[in-house]
Image (cartoon, helix red, strand yellow):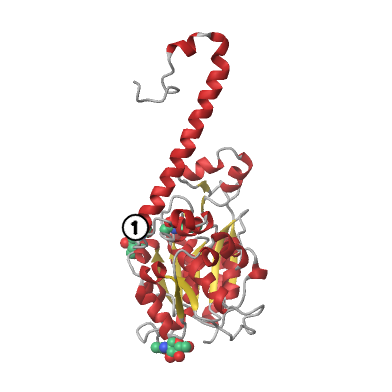
Amino acid sequence: MALLPSFVFPSSSSSSSSSSSVPSRTRRLAKLCIVLVVLMCAKSSLVFFISHLAYGQVNPLMLVQTSSDYRQMLYVTRNNYSHFVRDLIWRSVIRDWGGEGDYEQANTNRRPVRLEQWMIDKEPEYFKRLERAGMQFEIVRAPNNELFSWNKLLHSVCGNFFEDDATCKALDFRFGDAFNTTKTIRSEKRRKRIVWLSRGTNQRRAISNEKFVYNALKSAIPNMEYLIINSSILKKNPMVKQAEMFTDVDVLVSLHGAGLTNMLYMPEDSLVVEIMPKGYAKDTYMNFAKRLKLRYKRLTADADGDKGAKAGKVSLSTRTKYAFNSKEDKERKFKRDVIIKLHDYDIDSLRDMLSLEASKRK
Ligand SMILES: *[C@@H]1O[C@H](CO)[C@@H](O)[C@H](O)[C@H]1NC(C)=O
Ligand SMILES: *[C@@H]1O[C@H](CO)[C@@H](O)[C@H](O)[C@H]1NC(C)=O
Ligand SMILES: *[C@@H]1O[C@H](CO)[C@@H](O)[C@H](O)[C@H]1NC(C)=O
């Protein structure tokens, strides 16, 4: 009993007097809050320290040396492919290689792209391929708060989720050139290739009649080559293999989602078709496509208040995040996190977009 803090099991003397019960309860609550905050800080520090041990970056001073912005970058990018590739690597390249304004006016005064060792170690072969295609790297010693402060990367290069097109500089380098092996390149006279990026039965956002839509398009436009790629196929493969899958794609069709990051490897002037639930219009991938010199078309499909739509299932953390914000929660439901059903007229629109591509010459 004596080992436990007194506010957990208050002594009977302090709680017996009713006159002092209100202030002492407040004090106990305040103490509990302080203990909780201390425990939370201790936990995140421990997680951070252990994960650094795992990366061989043992430095006991790191906890005081790194900014919370840097730790945020590690937290967001380390285990998420699209954040890693799109938000960390791409932005680092733009930071060190980017020109101002148009793609055509890209800066030729390149300096080696600065990365930390753990980034390369994630998949050395991926960076070797980029090196062979002409990109140079310079390892900076971790932790380098300035370069990889998450806030700085997000707000001085392309903005959060590529929303700030004005700060998104140009790049005269095609990532696909690093991964276009003879195996992935097909003959000139080939049919156009459509990749349908499937979210399958993803509970959060998906197309409920996806198979039907896919088959309808396939039979309406038979003179194209069709390929389905989904997250389990992608996850099974290393980054190099994932990249290779997209180097020879003419049209990429996908419901809005992180998988669209793979457009990074597509050839110049190829087409990205993004299906967006009505009421949700995030320009991340539109701006990304623009920066990659790809063409972009958007199909806005019913969802908001539509009979075919169902609210998607989201994680507990998402629900917690929106628990006290009913307006944003409403925005989220049926707009961002939604299972949509494409109507006949949506399928007609898709067919028109794609048949136009099929008839185009290479
Ligand atoms: C990565 O992050 C994005 C955006 O925050 C999210 O949509 C996606 O599901 C995440 N991917 C994984 C594999 O966790
Ligand atoms: C890959 O792309 C680069 C640049 O366009 C080109 O020089 C190279 O020949 C291509 N490789 C193959 C195998 O087609
Ligand atoms: C992905 O596609 C493969 C091959 O078609 C299939 O076996 C698998 O179930 C799919 N995974 C998901 C999550 O849809």
Q: Residue at x 47, y 50 (%)?
A: 204
Q: Is residue 174 left or right of residue 126?
A: right
Instruction: From the top left corner, tell me how far across and down residue 246 is, in percent.
Output: 43, 75
Tally of marks: 1
Secondary structure under tag 1 reads helix
Q: Which part of the image, by quadrant, shows the N terminus?
A: top left
Q: Is residue 327 left or right of residue 310?
A: right
- Residue behind mark 1: 53
Is residue 214 visible in the rendered image? The answer is: no
Q: Residue furthest front?
A: 61
- For label 1, count other residues whose C-alpha is less than 10 Å away and answer few (under 14), some (14-19) or many (20+): few
Q: Is residue 178 left or right of residue 345?
A: left
Q: Residue at x 39, y 55 (%)?
A: 60
User: In which quarter of the view is residue 285 placed?
Assistant: bottom right
Instruction: From the top left corner, tell me how far across and down residue 122 is, in percent.
Output: 37, 68
- Please determine whether, in this image, residue 206 is positioned above or below residue 248: above
Is residue 85 visible in the rendered image? The answer is: yes
Q: Is residue 3 left or right of residue 204?
A: left
Front residue of 90/362: it is 90
Residue type, numbered disc 1: Leu
Instruction: From the top left corner, tell me how far across and down residue 180 is, in percent.
Output: 41, 83
Q: Residue at x 47, y 54 (%)?
A: 64
Instruction: From the top left corner, tell me how far across and down residue 161 is, in percent.
Output: 57, 62
Front residue of 59/233: it is 59
Front residue of 201/226: it is 201
- Please determine whether, in this image, residue 183 is positioned above or below residue 10: below
User: In which quarter of the view is residue 96 placed?
Assistant: bottom right
Front residue of 345/323: it is 323
